[in-house]
C-alpha cells in the first residue's frame, strides 16, 4: 500500500526530506508508491542562467529518494524556466517533469493519486515587494537597487531575476480549474495550493500586510462550490489548522494517505 505526505514551503532547502528528519521513508520500497507534496515555493528551479550546480545536486538527490516529489509552484519560483518544460500527461492531469520523480503539478489540473483526487492550483502574491519591482532588462537596475539599499529599503525584487509576474494566474488557468472541477462534479479529496483563500489569509495574517487578490478570491469561490476533505496550503510560514479541513503548512510533514 502506498503513502502520501505533504509539507510546506522549502525555498530550495529540501533537507527536511532527509531520512534523519523524515525517518518514515526508511520503510519505503517502491518509489512510485510513495509521494511527498510541497505546497509551493519549492525553489529548486530558480537560476535565470539555467540549472545551477547546487540545483542539480539537490534535484538529483530528490530523484534518488524512495518517493516521488510533487510540488505546486509558489510565488518564489522562476516561472520562465518552469514554463520551458514540456507539458506531459500524468495521473490524469498535465505536469512538468523536472526529473522523472520530481514533478510540478500545474494550475487547475486534477490528478488521481493512490485512488484519491487532488485539485492543484499554485501561485500567490509576493508580499516582500513593498519597496518596488526593478527590471533585469533595465541597464540601470543595479544602480537603482543601490539607491534603495542606501535608504534601507530592502523589500524589493527584480523582474526576471527574483520575481515573475506569472506568480498570479491567468484567466485561462482559472477557467481550466473550473472546467476540471466541473468534469469531476465539483468533488475532490484534496485541494493543494500555495496561496490561502481570502478568508484563510485574513484569519492567519497577523501582520495585516497581505491583501486579497484575484487568486485568493478565486480560491474562496471554488471552495464554496467544491466538496473536499482537506485543503492544504503554504505561503504564510505557519503550521496551523484553521479547522479540521483547512490547514496551513510550513515545516511539518504529515501523512495524508
Image: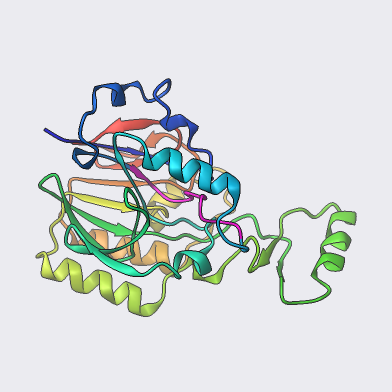
For the stretch drawn in magenta, the main secondary structure is: loop
218 over 20 or under it: above or below: below
Which quadrant: the N terminus?
A: top left
Quarter of the figure with residue 151: bottom right
Q: Is residue 97 above or below residue 19?
A: below
Who is closer to the viewer here, 174 or 88?
Answer: 88
> What x and y, as percent, mark residue 195?
42, 55
Residue 2 visible in image: yes
Q: Work out whether 101 lies above or below 224.
A: above
Across and down, in percent, residue 201 comes to 44, 51
Locate residue 205, reporting x and y percent: 51, 46
Query: Magenta region: which residues?
Result: 37-47
> Which quadrant would the C terminus be assigned to in this image?
top left
Number of numbered discs overlaid on the protein picture: 0
Q: Residue at x 52, y 48 (%)?
A: 56
Q: Taking 199 as reference, is 143 left or right?
A: right
Judge from the rendering whether residue 71 lies leftward or rightward of residue 55; answer left or right.
left
Residue shown at 39%/24% (left/top)? 19
Magenta stretch contains residue 125: no
Give x and y (percent) for residue 55.
54, 48
In the drawing, does residue 57 fall left or right of residue 229? right
Q: 81 and 217: which one is in front? A: 81
Picture residue at 31% right of the left edge, 51% below the top = 192
Residue 41 shown in magenta = yes
**Residue 9 visible (yes or no):** no
Amino acid at each position: 500500500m502506498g503513502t502520501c505526505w505533504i509539507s510546506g514551503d522549502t525555498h530550495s532547502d529540501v533537507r527536511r526530506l532527509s531520512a534523519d528528519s523524515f525517518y518514515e521513508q526508511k520503510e519505503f520500497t517502491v518509489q512510485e508508491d510513495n509521494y511527498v507534496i510541497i505546497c509551493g515555493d519549492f525553489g529548486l528551479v530558480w537560476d535565470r542562467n539555467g540549472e545551477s550546480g547546487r540545483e542539480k545536486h539537490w534535484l538529483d538527490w530528490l530523484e534518488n529518494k524512495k518517493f516521488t516529489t510533487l510540488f505546486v509552484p509558489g510565488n518564489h519560483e522562476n516561472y520562465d524556466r518552469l514554463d520551458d518544460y514540456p507539458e506531459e500527461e500524468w495521473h490524469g492531469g498535465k505536469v512538468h517533469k523536472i526529473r522523472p520523480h520530481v514533478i510540478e503539478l500545474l494550475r487547475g489540473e486534477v490528478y488521481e493519486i493512490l485512488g484519491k483526487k487532488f485539485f492543484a492550483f499554485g501561485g500567490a502574491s509576493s508580499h516582500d515587494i513593498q519597496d518596488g519591482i526593478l527590471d533585469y532588462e533595465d541597464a540601470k537596475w543595479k544602480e537603482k537597487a543601490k539607491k534603495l539599499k542606501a535608504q534601507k529599503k530592502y523589500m524589493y525584487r527584480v523582474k526576471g531575476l527574483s520575481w515573475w509576474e506569472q506568480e498570479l494566474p491567468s484567466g485561462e488557468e482559472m477557467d481550466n480549474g473550473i472546467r476540471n472541477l466541473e468534469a469531476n462534479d465539483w468533488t475532490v479529496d484534496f485541494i493543494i495550493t500555495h496561496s490561502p483563500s481570502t478568508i484563510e489569509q485574513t484569519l492567519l495574517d497577523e501582520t495585516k500586510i497581505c491583501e486579497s487578490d484575484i487568486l485568493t478570491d478565486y480560491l474562496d469561490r471554488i471552495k464554496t462550490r467544491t466538496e473536499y476533505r482537506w485543503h492544504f496550503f503554504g505561503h504564510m510560514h505557519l503550521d496551523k489548522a484553521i479547522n479540521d479541513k483547512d490547514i496551513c503548512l510550513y515545516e511539518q510533514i504529515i501523512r495524508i494517505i
